[in-house]
């Protein structure tokens, strides 16, 4: 259990966050939603591990837990 | 009053008055099959070939028109072949391997089923359902000529069914009025709307999908499409939210348009409206005739239990799936394959009545697998929320350039037989180094042998398949006989037997059930172990 990394794992967090927001610039809500969906799928494939993916889904469905 | 609900393709069993209708008391039959569709006919064939008298009652006088189930899987064909009519189906059917998936006006990707070599039957054939039924019926006629006790009564509608403990009472309406029968066993093969299920007040629960599909079978006059499966998500020609194009025999193409839930069926079925959708898809210059058309909706559901004392449900009456993945008629054929030998052993006293319960256990397992797969495909093809729709289109967008996403595209995961993993009839899996695909519970994979195929040699009964292993030519355990099929490296020029049944093992002994599923396997013959596995496979433990 708890294979999901919740401690910082991104070397330059501010830079990543800026890029993420910038990727959505100028997009309509629908276009942004489509980009997010593609991004989730690509990242999920990169992770691959079914346990981590399940934990991530669970963790994000109940963000306060 | 008997009124036809559909037009016939083949009027092969016209009503004829039976002596039973003039009998002073209801005549008792060993087995009555309710419904003469593909599953009812296959059931009659399975039992009749075992010498069990079987009476099929159908409220029409023959085989209904309309392509309906068109995609028949390898396993369904292998079962039909065990009954003697698989080759005729293959010869008439269209074999296809290539599929293309489109989104809007772009081809997202192309796949090839790349069927494994060394099987008598391909992964699938396309064949209109009336032909499939006709081949089963012709085989029934052939078996009857050899003395198989099969009778089919047309325009005999079952109106009431009553569980009488050790038999079933059946009330029937005919053009000459009503009569009654009794049956030791009643097999309900009367389709998704099963009147018999309703008569017994039984449940049939699951998900309703709020969508309708318009089918058009067309015969091309001016052009041809290739023998491929083409599937469009949100096609540019706007004839439906999704569209499927597939080839059938007789130069007929099947087109399914997903047209939404709130449609005026009568309006949509008008030829000019069907043509408008077709013309948008095909272009105005293409000439064609509409052979048949229909609108269907579907649900994914099953009965909680397929066996109810002396009434047993098989095919769509027991479980219904979406058409994506070809899991309807194909799974019904597997029901029949599973039930036939069990009922045979129970009726002849060679196995306890409890063996019938293993039909429920195994085929509920199969139905759940089919419902799961067909529900997933349906959710992909017809997304139920905005977010689901966004993800679906994201998959299609990515699939064009990223191979991983192609595996997520689900226009129907095509039917393969389920494996009865962990269920009651399975014996030991005691063959180290052997391939997982032939573990106990799995349907035997075919393999080429000198002058034929493995499944032909397995035939109908229990078989002790030995691969380079010693064993007696047959054993009898408590009235049930298993005969040996001795094969070895010398019979395996292609290496398929080794690959599919031995793996790294030096030798193997398989106990194989009459439905060609593996019951148990070992490296060497051990009489006590084999007898125990044979008892277990007959429900005697």
Image (cartoon, coloured by chain):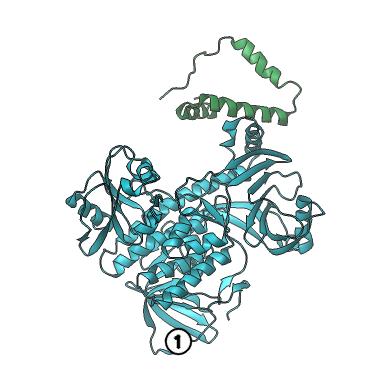
Chain colours: A green, B cyan
Return the x and y of residue B238 as percentages of the image width and height.
75, 47
Please report, as a chain letter, where disc 1 is located.
B
Return the x and y of residue B396 as percentages of the image width and height.
65, 36
Return the x and y of residue B315 as percentages of the image width and height.
47, 61
B178 is higher (above) or lower (below) than B486 = below
User: Which residue: 59% across, 9% down?
Assistant: A12
- Is B27 on the left or on the right of B154, as rendered? left
B401 is higher (above) or lower (below) than B276 = above
- Is B273 on the left or on the right of B171, as rendered? right
Return the x and y of residue B361 as percentages of the image width and height.
37, 54
B169 is higher (above) or lower (below) than A7 = below
- Helix, strand or loop at label 1? It is helix
Quadrant in the rendering for residue B62 = bottom right
Quadrant in the rendering for residue A1 = top left
How many numbered tags mark residues here?
1
Q: Nearer the viewer, residue B169 or B91?
A: B91
B476 is higher (above) or lower (below) than B525 = below
Residue B272 in view (yes/no): yes
User: Which residue: 72% across, 63% down?
Assistant: B290
Q: Label 1 belongs to which residue?
A: B21
């Amino acid at each position: 259990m708890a294979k999901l990394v919740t401690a910082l794992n991104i070397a330059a967090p501010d830079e990543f966050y800026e890029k993420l927001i910038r990727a959505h610039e100028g997009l309509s809500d629908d276009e942004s939603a489509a980009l997010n969906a593609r991004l989730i799928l690509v990242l999920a494939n990169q992770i691959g591990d079914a346990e981590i993916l399940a934990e991530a889904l669970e963790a994000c469905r109940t963000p306060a837990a | 009053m008997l009124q036809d609900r559909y037009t016939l393709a083949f009027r092969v069993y016209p009503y004829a008055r039976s002596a039973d209708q003039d009998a002073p008391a209801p005549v008792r039959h060993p087995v009555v099959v309710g419904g003469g569709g593909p599953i009812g006919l296959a059931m009659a064939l399975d039992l009749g070939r075992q010498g069990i008298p079987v009476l099929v009652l159908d409220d029409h006088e023959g085989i209904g028109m309309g392509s309906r189930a068109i995609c028949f899987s390898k396993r369904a064909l292998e079962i039909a072949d065990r009954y003697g009519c698989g080759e005729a189906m293959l010869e008439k059917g269209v074999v296809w391997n290539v599929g293309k998936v489109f989104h809007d006006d772009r081809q997202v990707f192309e796949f090839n089923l790349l069927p494994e070599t060394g099987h008598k039957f391909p992964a699938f054939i396309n064949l209109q359902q009336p032909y499939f039924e006709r081949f089963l019926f012709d085989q029934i006629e052939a078996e009857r000529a050899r003395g198989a006790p099969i009778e089919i009564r047309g325009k005999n509608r079952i109106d009431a069914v009553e569980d009488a403990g050790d038999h079933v009472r059946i009330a029937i309406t005919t053009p000459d009025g009503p009569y009654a029968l009794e049956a030791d066993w009643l097999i309900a093969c009367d389709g998704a709307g099963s009147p018999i299920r309703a008569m017994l007040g039984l449940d049939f629960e699951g998900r309703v999908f709020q969508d309708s599909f318009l089918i058009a079978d067309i015969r091309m006059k001016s052009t041809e499409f290739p023998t491929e499966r083409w599937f469009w998500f949100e096609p540019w020609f706007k004839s439906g939210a999704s569209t499927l194009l597939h080839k059938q025999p007789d130069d007929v193409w099947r087109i399914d348009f997903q047209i939404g839930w709130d449609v005026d069926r009568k309006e949509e079925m008008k030829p000019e409206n069907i043509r408008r959708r077709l013309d948008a898809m095909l272009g105005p210059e293409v000439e064609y005739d509409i052979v048949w058309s229909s609108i269907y909706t579907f649900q994914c559901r099953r009965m909680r239990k397929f066996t109810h004392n002396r009434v047993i449900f098989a095919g769509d009456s027991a479980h219904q799936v979406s058409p994506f993945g070809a899991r309807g008629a194909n799974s019904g054929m597997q029901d029949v394959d599973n039930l036939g030998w069990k009922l045979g052993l129970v009726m002849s006293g060679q196995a306890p009545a409890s063996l019938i319960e293993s039909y429920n256990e195994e085929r509920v397992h199969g139905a759940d697998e089919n419902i799961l797969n067909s529900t997933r495909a349906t959710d992909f093809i017809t997304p139920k929320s905005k977010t689901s729709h966004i993800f679906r289109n994201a998959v299609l967008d990515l699939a064009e350039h990223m191979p991983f996403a192609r595996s997520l595209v689900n226009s129907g995961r095509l039917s393969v037989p389920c494996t009865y993993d962990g269920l009651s009839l399975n014996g030991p899996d005691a063959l180290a180094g052997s391939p997982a695909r032939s573990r106990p519970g799995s349907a035997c994979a075919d393999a080429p042998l000198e002058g034929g195929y493995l499944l032909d040699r397995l035939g109908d009964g229990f078989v002790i398949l030995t691969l380079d292993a010693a064993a007696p030519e047959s054993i009898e355990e408590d009235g049930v006989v298993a005969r040996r099929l001795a094969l070895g490296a010398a019979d395996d020029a292609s290496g398929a037997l080794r690959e599919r049944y031995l793996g790294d093992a030096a030798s193997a002994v398989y106990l194989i059930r009459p439905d060609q599923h593996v019951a148990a396997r070992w490296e060497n013959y051990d009489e006590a172990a084999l007898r125990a596995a044979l008892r277990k496979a007959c429900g005697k433990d």
